[in-house]
Image (spheres, grey):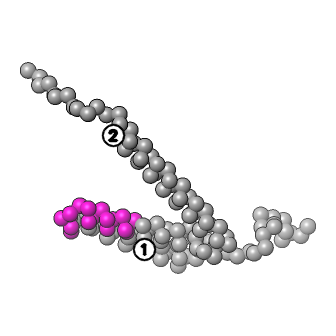
Amino acid sequence: MSVHEINHGADAGHESHEHHGGSMSDYVKGFIFSVILTAIPFALVMGKVFSDSKTTIAIILAFAFVQVLVHMRYFLHMSGKSEGGWTILALIFTVTLVVIMFSGSVWVMYHLDTNMMPSHVPAKHEMP
């Protein structure tokens, strides 16, 4: 066994020796995008730009979604090409499970609240 094979034993069995990490410029771009995608919603909330809170929440959620994509691309290095597409497939599977668990939990809590709570609320007794 050569010294090269001993030093790179972790790579045994892998056909491709592609670089899985990102370059420094990718990390810097990701950091800058993350700061911008955090600062804009923060300014919207602190400056009370929109009078309707639902609009503000919708915009914050949109920025959060974009920030998730930035983190996946620049920090987690996930793309359709990485790992032969298995990382994207694993992400789709994970998102599907989270949606099923979240919607099922909300459905169960809603029906428990609807069916188990008394139909009337007793009047509050005032203290003398």
Q: Which mark is residue 77?
A: none
Q: CA distance from mark 2 to mark 1?
A: 44 Å
For disc 1, the marked residue is 33
Q: Position of residue 93 (x, y in %)?
A: 58, 60
Residue type indicated by callout 1? Phe
Residue matched to label 2: 114
Give how far across and how far down residue 4 sits, in percent: 83, 71
Which mark sits nearer the N-terminus, 2 or 1? 1
Of circles 2 and 1, which is in front?
2
- Rendering coords of residue 3 (x, y %): 86, 69
Q: Quadrant of residue 46?
A: bottom left
Task: Label 2: state its secondary structure.
Answer: helix
Whether residue 7 is visible to the viewer of this picture, yes or no, is no
Check the picture and name the quadrant holding the C terminus: top left
Query: Which residue is rendered at x = 31% and y = 65% of the image?
Result: 58
The amino acid pointed to by label 2 is: Thr
Position of 96 with respect to 125 (left or right) is right
Identify the residue at horizontal 30%, vertical 62% (top origin): 57
Q: Residue at x 58, y 73 (%)?
A: 79
Q: Main secondary structure of the magenta part?
A: helix
Look at the image and give the residue range highlighted in magenta: 48-64
Residue 50 % position (x, y): 21, 67
Q: Is residue 43 magenta?
A: no
User: Is-magenta flag for residue 51?
Assistant: yes
- Taking depth in this image into account, of 86 and 73 the one nearest to the observer is 86
Q: Which residue is situated farthest in the right direction here?
A: 1
